[in-house]
């Protein structure tokens, strides 16, 4: 939200260029979203493979649909037909780049664009890309990962017969990383011209933008999350033989390495940073310990923000555009005080809408999910107890 707020509502002259760059880095929240998906979804497949137990593929897809689809459809309908704050068509060549994004807001009337958005397939063609909620292009990529993940898991099991489960999982994860880096590097090499032209090539109605938003060019972000899941499972299995201090030092070094890697590839570097950060938070829980960062994240307001974060993600950009259109009458706030007020309003409105959507739509849908693994993982991560009992729980999951 900070990244999009800065990008769309904060004029260049109000803040320094350096501060604008720092705030725009908040847009890497999407990178965290993809890394988390690789981390949380690859783990159950690893657990099933380690147990040599079958994985319930139909239930997996049912759970995925219940997680993302009900809230998305409701928010899309409200934003598109009620508020008229949807992106009605892709950015055009010769447009004003991100500065002209507000010109394409309205109510979608094209049945093809509506259908593509409802099916979460709008990022697959240049005629529908970046329409609808704006941020929902990433859900097409997420759904593609859902479809690919069982194949990656089956490939891991097949390779494990020759090289062992851990090595096979590492090989598959590195394959995703190499694929993503190679495809994104190849695609970005085709981006050129002035800022407006570059924006069009990366986000507009063309096949290069479709390619750059695809699972091919985001595969490394999911792959880093998958690799983090392997580290977590390995740590849980070898909890008695790994020095907690050595593990923490290694993870802090990985975080630093991720920030350095942002100089070479921004998205990949932040993916490594976030993966190491997740492991710092979760690894301490394996033997029943905790750390200050985990304690902060357990604070009630932050936990609730995490609970409603999916709806928050879908609502925040329409809220920003609503403030732009109705509160500021189509102009940007041009003083620091007005910008601060706008951000507080955006945060409060988005949180309120997200809470309502979660309580009315998401939570009822989530209750329909079958989640035996999630119950075990949550017990291992968050339930306080003795070190030996926590370690035993994690060994049962890893085994």
Image: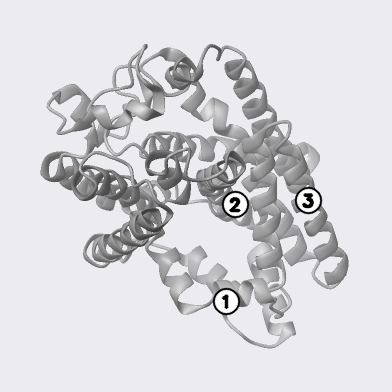
Could you tell me which secondary element the residue under label 2 belongs to?
helix
Residue 295, horizontal then vertical, whole percent: 61, 77
Q: As rendered, which of 13 and 302 lies closer to the eye?
A: 13
**For residue 39, which numbered disc appears in the image?**
2
Q: Residues within 10 Å of mark 1 (few under 14, many from 20)?
A: some
Residue 115 in sight here? no
Could you tell me which secondary element the residue under label 1 belongs to?
helix
User: How far is the residue under mark 1 from the one under mark 2?
Assistant: 17 Å
The residue labelled by disc 3 is 256
Residue 135 in sight here? yes
Tags 1 and 3 in contact by the CB under 8 Å rule? no
Q: Residue at x 22, y 43 (%)?
A: 76
Residue 213, horizontal then vertical, whole percent: 47, 27
Quadrant holding the C terminus: bottom right
Between tags 3 and 2, which lies in front?
3
Residue 344, horizontal then vertical, whole percent: 36, 62
User: How far is the residue under mark 1 from the one under mark 3?
Assistant: 27 Å
Residue 102, horizontal then vertical, whole percent: 28, 32
Q: Mark 1 or mark 3: which comes first in sequence?
A: 3
**For residue 382, which numbered disc appears in the image?**
1
Q: Residues within 10 Å of mark 3 (few under 14, many from 20)?
A: some
Q: Mark 3 or mark 2: which comes first in sequence?
A: 2
Tags 1 and 2 in contact by the CB under 8 Å rule? no
Compared across the picture, whether 227 is left or right of 89 comes to: right
Between tags 1 and 3, which lies in front?
3
Q: Residue at x 62, y 37 (%)?
A: 267
Could you tell me which secondary element the residue under label 3 belongs to?
helix
Q: Residue at x 45, y 22 (%)?
A: 199
Q: Mark 1 or mark 2: which comes first in sequence?
A: 2
């Amino acid at each position: 939200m900070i990244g999009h707020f800065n990008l769309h509502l904060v004029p260049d002259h109000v803040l320094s260029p350096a501060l604008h760059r720092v705030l725009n880095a908040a847009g890497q929240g999407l990178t965290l979203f993809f890394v988390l998906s690789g981390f949380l979804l690859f783990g159950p497949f690893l657990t099933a493979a380690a147990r040599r137990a079958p994985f319930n593929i139909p239930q997996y897809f049912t759970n995925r649909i219940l997680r993302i689809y009900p809230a998305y459809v409701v928010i899309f309908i409200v934003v598109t037909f009620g508020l008229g704050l949807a992106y009605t068509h892709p950015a055009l060549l010769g447009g004003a780049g991100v500065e002209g994004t507000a010109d394409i807001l309205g109510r979608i009337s094209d049945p093809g664009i509506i259908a593509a958005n409802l099916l979460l397939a709008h990022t697959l063609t240049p005629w529908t890309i970046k329409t609808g909620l704006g941020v929902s292009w990433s859900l097409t990529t997420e759904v593609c990962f859902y479809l690919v993940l069982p194949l990656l898991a089956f490939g891991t099991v097949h390779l494990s017969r020759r090289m062992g489960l851990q090595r096979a999982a590492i090989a598959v994860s590195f394959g995703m990383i190499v694929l993503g880096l190679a495809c994104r590097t190849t695609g970005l090499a085709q981006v050129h011209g002035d800022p407006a032209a570059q924006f069009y090539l990366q986000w507009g109605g063309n096949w290069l933008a479709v390619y750059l938003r695809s699972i091919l060019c985001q595969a490394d972000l999911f792959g880093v999350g998958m690799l983090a899941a392997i580290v977590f499972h390995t740590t849980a299995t070898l909890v008695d033989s790994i020095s907690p201090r050595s593990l923490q030092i290694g993870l802090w070094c990985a975080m630093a390495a991720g920030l350095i890697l942002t100089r070479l590839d921004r998205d990949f570097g932040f993916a490594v940073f976030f993966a190491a950060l997740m492991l710092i938070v979760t690894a301490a829980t394996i033997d029943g310990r905790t750390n200050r960062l985990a304690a902060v994240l357990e604070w009630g307001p932050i936990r609730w923000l995490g609970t409603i974060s999916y709806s928050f993600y879908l609502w925040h950009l329409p809220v920003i555009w609503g403030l732009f259109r109705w509160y500021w009458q189509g102009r940007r706030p041009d003083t620091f005080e007005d910008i601060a007020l706008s951000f507080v309003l955006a945060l409060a409105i988005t949180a309120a809408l997200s809470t309502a959507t979660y309580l009315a739509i998401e939570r009822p849908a989530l209750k329909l999910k079958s989640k035996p693994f999630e119950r075990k993982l949550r017990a291992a991560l968050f339930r306080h107890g003795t070190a030996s009992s926590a370690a035993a729980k994690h060994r049962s999951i890893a085994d």
